[in-house]
Amino acid sequence: MFKRYLPILSWLPHYSTRLLGADLLAGIIVTIMVIPQSLAYAILAGLPAVVGLYASLLPAVFYAFLGTSRTLAVGPVAIIALMTGAALSKVAVPGSVDYVQAALVLSLLSGLMLTIMGFLRLGFFANFLSHPVIGGFLSASGLLIAVSQLKHLLGIDAGGYTAVALLESLAHHLKDIHWPTVAVGVGTLTFLVVTRRLGRRALTALRLPAGLAALLVKAGPVAAVVVTTLISWRLDLSSHGVATVGAIPAGLPGLTLPAFDMSLWHALLVPALLISVVGFVESISMAQMLAAKRRERISPNQELVGLGGANLAAAFTAGMPVTGGLSRTVINQESGAQTPLAGLFAAIGIGAVTLALTPLLEHLPIATLAATITVAILTLVDIGLIRQTWRYSRSDFSALAVTLVVTLVEGVEAGIIAGVALSIGLFLYRTSRPHSAVVGRIPGSEHFRSITRHDVETVSHVALLRIDESLYFANARYLEDTLYSLVASRPELTDVVLICSAVNLIDASALESLDAINARLKDSRVTLHLSEVKGPVMDRLKLSDFLDHLTGRVFLSTYAAWAELHRVRD
Amino acid sequence: MFKRYLPILSWLPHYSTRLLGADLLAGIIVTIMVIPQSLAYAILAGLPAVVGLYASLLPAVFYAFLGTSRTLAVGPVAIIALMTGAALSKVAVPGSVDYVQAALVLSLLSGLMLTIMGFLRLGFFANFLSHPVIGGFLSASGLLIAVSQLKHLLGIDAGGYTAVALLESLAHHLKDIHWPTVAVGVGTLTFLVVTRRLGRRALTALRLPAGLAALLVKAGPVAAVVVTTLISWRLDLSSHGVATVGAIPAGLPGLTLPAFDMSLWHALLVPALLISVVGFVESISMAQMLAAKRRERISPNQELVGLGGANLAAAFTAGMPVTGGLSRTVINQESGAQTPLAGLFAAIGIGAVTLALTPLLEHLPIATLAATITVAILTLVDIGLIRQTWRYSRSDFSALAVTLVVTLVEGVEAGIIAGVALSIGLFLYRTSRPHSAVVGRIPGSEHFRSITRHDVETVSHVALLRIDESLYFANARYLEDTLYSLVASRPELTDVVLICSAVNLIDASALESLDAINARLKDSRVTLHLSEVKGPVMDRLKLSDFLDHLTGRVFLSTYAAWAELHRVRD
């Protein structure tokens, strides 16, 4: 019972020195690795860089106690940061106190929603974000984030939260390019791309173990941060107009209280919901992938509670919305983390840095962080997935394409809503015009297959019609049309068998249609039979009086119907 | 080709004197019968009574040429009149010139929408109004209309367009009850209820033929109109405060031009859409019922064009939104109408009345019309359907109940939207948690049934799992959960067969899940097989590389899988 709500109880009693060693090492590596991205994502959201560090402390600790994944790492992530920026810029001016305050409200709302969804067991809601919608959204977000970083890489003061607005604003200010900033930004970008592309191969050639080589390549951003900070400090780049992180208040975050301002809450309600759902989907996808590798189980509803707790913690400790992140989890995993304690150790490590070492970050150029984000984020643009989806299904592709385009043109929230609405609409449309097949017997067997696809036996006075969909309101009329056409086109018919092997539900509308069909076929002296009706569907039919009116019989199998009806006339 | 867009061409060439006689007679009867209800529905919509006559002229002629139903009668109907009143009262003051103008705009918009939907072949949209939603809506409308007529029956000046608002307003003005009006209203009401309940039996007892008796009973409202008009005229009731129809401009309607006022159009857009859809659903349900009786075919998309044309005609001839009506169609049918010419003759008849006899209607009490509406409309309240839906399915019942309650409390538009949204939501929820069953072989047969419902053969190292739903984004994760639980709970498993007889689609999300399942089961040394994959689904799978990775085989039948896997180990 307690284990279900405090998953930490299921592994802590079995904890060992061996696990402690592994978790400690992972904690130290993660501390170093995630500092640049934490700062970068806070800036992506338009918040002071230090907020990214704050949001990596207590939220990670809360998740360690409440979450069901052993190695998921929780903190600020790129997409959530982007959505946070888009939401906050509608209610406050970036850089203002109100803006930072609104970030707390957003974390609080998101935390409350996730927790409530968890207690109401609404984890299944995330299922309505289909893979194509997520794919289109991630690709668009990658492009959008990359475009949003251009201003930092070029030293231009541009604004906007859609790709179109950003590019327009950039084009407008192109004459203001600040070349020293470009030198830092493009220099870092080139360094990161090269280490990513060639680093691992080069290091493996130096006979380093593959695992260490991979980790060193991932340390590229850390090296870039250290080197550009040193250069910036020695050359005093900020006095030459290169934007830097600037003075960071030393020390741990104080306890913050999100503003209780109804109009602000109201304005942030929809963004908070979308941030919650998107964050949950990113997090749970990652957690399930890891759990699958390690043969563990994830509870989606408990994950909601874990992420909810993390966001509530962020709201009260000067943070920003957080979730389980792709890159930080991969780092945690590859550093050898075994239990959530690794996350706890990393939080302690980042806390130590926040407490003591923030003055070192003062000279860190923003352009370096922008380069870090750009390189990390462009991997989200998944051309392979787009191509593969196009090949597999035009309908899935259209959901992907609409999500991608609307996200780029109108922004992240509109993109997700459009994608989900289109997916649902297409599904409903498809089920409203179900596939059906007139089938015949595969000679000598008890199997029946479509007469257009297979060489099968048929009898002229019996039609065997298989409907490949549940019968419900959206296709009830279509069912009538299909049956009436069938009967109209074959005047010699005396018996129609409706094969229900693919019918998982008959709702009240469809039942009424079946009643109408039965009565109308009776007028035409055609008997209606059913076959292969599933248990739950049959139970339901017995609650109505349809079976009393049915002119024909309900056969256990299509073969039984065939044997019976075939015989009657021969 | 022409026949498809002008259905009149398919029957006019075969027209005969016998058909002409029948149609003429029906036209005359319909003329007399529908005048009271046409006046009443115009008043229900808050419009001058004569508008109801105007809307029974040209719209009916247009439908006769464009519609595919032979005996559907088009004109003002109760529900559409109620929705028209609710929509217009939001944009203009009842009784004002603007109000009448707005009715023309509403007809125009509705006509355009219906026509465009017809050309775009969007007739299937009406399918999303499920039977329970329509049932709940009709019952609520019946109650709502009855409540809305109370003020006319009681001679009270009350307002509002939701049941709650109407009753509140009535309660507020209850002291203003006008007893002479009550005498007319309640007197008529009693007369109509009695003729309806006892009339046919009494007339049949008098040895009149059943058909004639039925028609005479239907003439009850005509008798009530004639008698109360005479009384009202002789006693000069209007000078005693009984509201009457009053002076009606004699003559046919002039050509009217709906106002081109963008803000008005915008305000009426959603009501026009709902009026179009509800009108179409009422009309097509009736048309299909009639066509079924007469072995004719209805084309839903051409019906949209026919109703669209009728509403456009209404917009340009001082009318109001129209559709195929329940009661007027039944009268037309029972009077022996054979072709749409009957509708044309009735339109000519009503035109003659409008031209010459409107002065006779001046003294007709509104209370008489209110009583006519009330009696006709209360038959919409279908307690039997409500009880039956409750018994058959709680989910269908909840859609019905929500539509009914929201329509009463919030109004017709909110009611329909809430009902449709809930139906779709429930359908999606259900398909997101599909039924699945582990099956075994019915001894000695090639059939497989659920191990919990039947006494079947099983083998411990093979699991046969039947998923009773298409696999798509909303249930992809559920599929993973189901399979992982199955494998986790049976460590001796070596083979899992996924029976796809009820799988009508595998979308890109589900394909990705199947890929993940396949890979994960492979890690656990469990082989994944499929069986009974349908043709279209298989075609789709061949477009992906899933089949190349699949660890097991795709069996034509579950029996083939059983035979093969059973043998392997024994």
Image (cartoon, coloured by chain):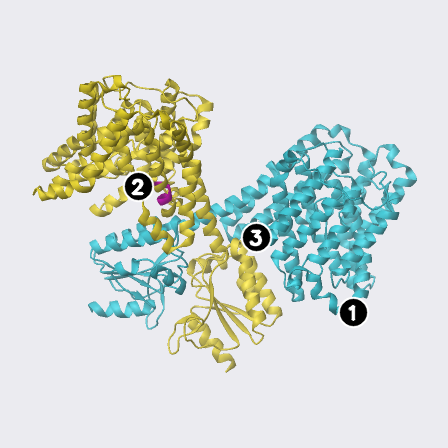
Chain colours: A yellow, B cyan
In the rendered structure, the answer to whether residue A114 lies left or right of residue B67 reads left
Using a 10 Å C-alpha cutoff, classify the residue at mark 3 as few (fewer than 14 neighbours), some (14 to 19) or many (20 or more).
some
Q: Is residue B437 above or below residue B192?
A: below
- In the picture shown, does residue B280 fall above or below B440? above
Q: Is residue B421 left or right of residue A225?
A: right
Residue B122: image tag:
3
Distance of label 2 from label 3 (alpha carbons)? 38 Å
Dots 2 and 3: beta carbons under 8 Å? no
* Residue B173 at x, y percent in the picture: 73, 28
Residue A321, image x, y percentages? 33, 29
Residue of label 1: B16
Mark 2 residue type? Leu
- Where are the magenta residues, as a range? A134-138
Q: Is residue A335 visible?
A: no
Horizontal side of B107 relative to A15 (left or right) equals: right
Q: Position of residue A458 (x, y in %)?
A: 47, 76
Chain containing the residue with disc 3: B
The chain ID associated with circle 1 is B
Q: Which mark is residue A380?
A: 2
Residue B445 in percent (x, y) is at 35, 72
* Main secondary-structure element of the magenta-colored stretch: helix
The disc labelled 3 sits on which kind of residue? Leu
Please tell me whether mark 1 or mark 2 is closer to you in this view: 2
